[in-house]
Image (cartoon, helix red, strand yellow):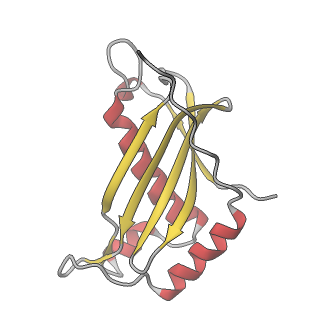
Amino acid sequence: MSRPFVLRNTIRFSHTDPASYVFFPRYFEMLQAAVEEWFTQALGVNYADLILKEKLGLPTARTECEFLKPSRLGENLDLAVYLEKIGRSSMRLTFVGTVEGEIRLHAQSVLVVIELADGRPVAIPEALREQMLAYQKRQGPIPARPALRSQA
């Protein structure tokens, strides 16, 4: 069965605002954690080693997120990671966040592989590219972006 990598995040007090809803910048921290775990667990490439030993960085060049429904203290937010596109030195990831199957957020990020010594983009290493292509084949279809409700 095809399925994407999913990282479960229990919503903690430290993630929330005084009303017990996730404070929106915390979602971006959760997305970064999902990226790091996706590399390590789903691709078999230790994220820390990529930076510390291989001297490659993966800064986020672009990110966007649609918040469809708030998440609250105590809920389990599952972040699914889909590899949408692989470029020469970049990749576009789509994240779908759900609580008990209900979509709470839909996000996209573009990551660029850089040489840490000079900060310049470099080609994705061939071994990593192969792992990414294999993941793309087994992740299943990327869910369509849900329509936002009109707030007018």
Task: Name the quadrant of the N terminus.
Answer: bottom right
Between 84 and 71, the one nearer to me in the picture: 84
Task: Name the quadrant of the C terminus.
Answer: top left
In terms of image quadrants, where is residue 130? Answer: bottom right
Between 43 and 126, the one nearer to me in the picture: 126
Residue 81, compared with residue 73, is above or below; it is below
In terms of image quadrants, where is residue 60? Answer: bottom left
Rendered location of residue 131, percent (x, y): 59, 77
Residue 10, compared with residue 134, is above or below; it is above
Rendered location of residue 81, percent (x, y): 56, 53
In terms of image quadrants, where is residue 111? Answer: bottom left
Rendered location of residue 69, percent (x, y): 51, 24
Number of numbered discs on residues = 0
Q: For the view shown, which residue lies furthest in the front direction?
A: 152
Rendered location of residue 20, percent (x, y): 41, 16
At 68% from the left edge and 32% from the top edge, which residue is drawn?
Answer: 101
At 43% from the left edge and 47% from the top edge, which residue is drawn?
Answer: 31
